[in-house]
């Protein structure tokens, strides 16, 4: 129920203002208002998926759901035109099962399933005067227009090459003829040698191709510094989780779709190398936090200077050397030396990601979590379609012949990745009532159609800001959609939309709490099982004393990523009403044990690198965690445990 906080995303606000409103205006000037409505709806849905990140990831985040939306519009249009009420309900219910199942794969797949169902409801319940072969390209054009704005427009912070960064000495270059000495980089004592003349300032130019990637990688180094500051305090766990989130975000930002397999530009190769250089730093920082010992403040200064260098696309300058008094600090020192070399002449190593095969994706869809999600979405969507059909054929809508609102509302309400069920329902109801009342007031005073076009443009600009709270987003989207359908020729329908929303809320609340076949809490159990398997693979690799560092970092990234996904699913499930929350009770305790196990495994890896053997503290902690995990694991379902 709390709103997210942060700076106003002015770039997204600008894109929203230039998307739906101008598209609708161009269509009106061309005399094709209905196609403009379709294109504006597509731009609105794409704007909802326009989240912070790199331009490359936006291609997948916006483009894949848009393609699914076009398919849904095609299927819904043909089904609504050629099928009776019963057959149409069956077809859309089956589509709800498909959309719910694929939503279990991940965030992009969830957006894909949402657009598939929403546009199928719109295609079937809002018959348009234009043929399908025109409406589907118009939908793709609307989404493609916002995607083009995302790829081509610069952002306000895209000026790279901070002239203040990189002054003074350049980064330390390790010499293979001598053992690396920390005082080569910086020494707290005064240096009697004359200060070298500063080199040429980095080129300050407008380079916005990789601004999202650059920010994401810099946040990783900031998170490493924050974890080092928190080592030995009660905040270390939260800072380690923040480091995992930063690494996940950077990994996704750099691993987006590309025409070539490897980076094609020097700037992108440099960013890949800088991301890879942060992995050993994060490993050493995690080991220091696991040891529960405070770290000198000087140790965190190096990662912070590296973060500033990434943001400014500049040289790192001198890096403070931490004391080399224990294995974790020696690992941190070695990681800083490696980073200094990478920042000077980095190459593009692997991103240490494990690609999911088609078979793995199918197993996710058909697994316990996918089946539970599919059944819930299919039942809610099908019940909403059946109810809307009954009202439509019983002439309850009066002058409003479009019945898409009820099933489309149910789609947004049934999605568990948007928050707990009851809070989603409350936010949706409140947002729709407020949005409908606001639109009724606007419709009474605004000139038509020019006033409605301005209203659409303003709402499009507000969508990125309103996305911080589901009720606020619902309010803005309600006003925007009601304005669009009025431009398309439908009369003012605020009262009817309020009634349909409340009816959809009741349907989702009832269906969402009905007992279903099989074991409940399948989504949480699936995430826990994935985290269990990833932790097991990571532990086996480390205890096997393999020299393959790249494989170890890949397994470590997978273990922490799956744990973060499990934690998010557990938090959502715990916020449900007791009837639903009890099915995942105890999962948070299992996730906490797995987190401690992965942290201990990381500490073991760092210690093995330094000494070649584990201390009794490491082995005792591993044994205790194994026993605790075996005890707790059975409380949330029967599955394999670490042995």
Image: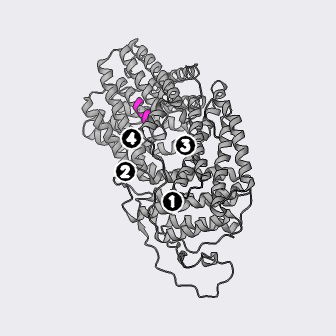
| Vertical order, 506 against 213 (above or below) | above
Residue picked out by circle 3: 468
* SS category of the residue bearing label 3: loop
Which numbered disc flags the more N-terminal residue, 1 or 4? 4
* SS category of the residue bearing label 4: helix
Residue 146 is inside the magenta segment: no
Magenta span: predominant SS is: helix
Which numbered disc flags the more N-terminal residue, 2 or 4? 4
Q: Which region shows up in magenta?
A: 111-117
**Number of other residues with Cα within 10 Å of mark 4, as a class: few under 14, some 14 to 19, many 20 or more:** some
Residue picked out by circle 4: 64
* SS category of the residue bearing label 2: helix
Q: Is residue 173 left or right of residue 232?
A: left
Residue placed most toward the observer, 379 or 81? 379
| Quadrant showing the C terminus | top right
Residue picked out by circle 2: 149
Q: Nearer the viewer, mark 2 or mark 4?
A: 4
Which numbered disc flags the more N-terminal residue, 2 or 3? 2
Looking at the image, do the residues carrying marks 2 and 1 touch, with CB atoms under 8 Å apart? no
CA separation in Å, label 1 and label 4: 26 Å
Residue picked out by circle 1: 275
| Quadrant showing the N terminus | top right
CA separation in Å, label 3 and label 1: 28 Å
Mark identifier at residue 542: none
């Amino acid at each position: 129920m709390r709103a997210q906080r942060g700076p106003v995303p002015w770039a997204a606000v600008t894109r929203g203002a230039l998307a739906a409103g101008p598209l609708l205006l161009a269509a009106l000037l061309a005399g094709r208002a209905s196609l403009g409505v379709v294109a504006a709806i597509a731009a609105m849905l794409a704007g909802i998926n326009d989240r912070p990140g790199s331009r490359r990831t936006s291609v997948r985040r916006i483009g894949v759901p848009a393609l699914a939306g076009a398919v849904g519009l095609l299927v819904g249009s043909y089904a609504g035109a050629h099928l009776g009420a019963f057959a149409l309900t069956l077809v859309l219910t089956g589509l709800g099962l498909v959309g719910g199942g694929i939503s279990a794969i991940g965030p992009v797949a969830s957006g894909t399933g949402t657009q598939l169902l929403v546009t199928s409801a719109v295609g079937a319940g809002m018959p348009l005067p234009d043929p399908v072969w025109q409406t589907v390209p118009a939908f793709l054009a609307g989404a493609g227009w916002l995607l083009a704005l995302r790829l081509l427009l610069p952002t306000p912070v895209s000026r790279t090459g901070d002239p203040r960064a990189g002054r003074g000495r350049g980064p330390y270059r390790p010499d293979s003829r001598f053992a690396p000495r920390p005082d080569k980089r910086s020494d707290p004592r005064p240096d009697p040698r004359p200060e070298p003349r500063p080199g040429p300032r980095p080129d300050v130019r407008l380079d916005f191709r990789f601004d999202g990637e650059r920010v994401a990688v810099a946040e990783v180094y900031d998170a490493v510094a924050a974890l080092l500051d928190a080592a030995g305090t009660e905040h270390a766990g939260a800072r380690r989780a923040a480091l995992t989130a930063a690494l996940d975000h950077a990994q996704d930002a750099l691993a987006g779709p590309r025409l070539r397999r490897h980076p094609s530009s020097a700037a992108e190769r440099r960013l890949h190398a800088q991301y890879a250089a942060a992995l050993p730093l994060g490993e050493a920082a995690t080991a220091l936090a696991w040891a529960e010992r405070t770290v000198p403040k000087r140790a965190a200064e190096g990662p912070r200077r590296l973060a500033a260098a990434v943001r400014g696309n500049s040289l790192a300058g001198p890096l403070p050397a931490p004391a080399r008094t224990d294995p974790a600090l020696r690992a941190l020192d070695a990681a800083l030396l490696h980073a200094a070399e990478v920042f000077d002449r980095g190459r593009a190593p692997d991103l240490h990601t494990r690609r999911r095969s088609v078979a793995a994706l199918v197993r996710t869809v058909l697994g316990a979590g996918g089946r539970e999600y599919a059944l819930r979405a299919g039942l809610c969507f099908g019940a909403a379609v059946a109810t809307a059909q009954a009202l439509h054929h019983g002439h309850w809508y009066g002058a409003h012949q479009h019945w898409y609102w009820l099933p489309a509302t149910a789609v947004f309400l049934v999605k568990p990745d948007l928050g707990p069920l009851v809070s989603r329902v409350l936010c949706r109801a409140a947002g729709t009532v407020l949005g409908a009342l606001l639109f009724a007031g606007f419709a009474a005073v605004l000139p038509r159609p020019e006033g409605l076009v301005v209203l659409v443009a303003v709402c499009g600009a507000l969508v990125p800001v309103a996305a911080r709270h589901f009720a606020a987003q619902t309010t803005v989207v309600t006003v925007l959609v009601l304005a669009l359908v009025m431009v398309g020729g439908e009369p003012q329908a605020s009262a009817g939309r309020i009634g349909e929303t409340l009816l959809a809320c009741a349907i989702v609340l009832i269906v969402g709490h009905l007992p279903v076949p099989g074991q409940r809490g399948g989504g949480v159990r699936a995430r826990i099982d994935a985290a269990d398997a990833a932790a097991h693979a990571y532990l086996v690799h480390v205890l096997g004393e393999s020299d393959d560092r790249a494989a170890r970092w890949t397994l470590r990234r997978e273990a922490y990523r799956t744990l973060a996904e499990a934690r998010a699913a557990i938090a959502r499930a715990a916020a449900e009403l007791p009837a639903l929350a009890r099915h995942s009770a105890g999962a948070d305790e299992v996730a906490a044990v797995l987190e401690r196990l992965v942290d201990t495994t990381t500490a073991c890896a760092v210690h093995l690198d330094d000494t070649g053997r584990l201390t009794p503290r490491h082995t005792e902690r591993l044994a205790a965690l194994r026993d605790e995990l075996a005890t707790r694991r059975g409380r949330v379902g029967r599955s394999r445990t670490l042995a």
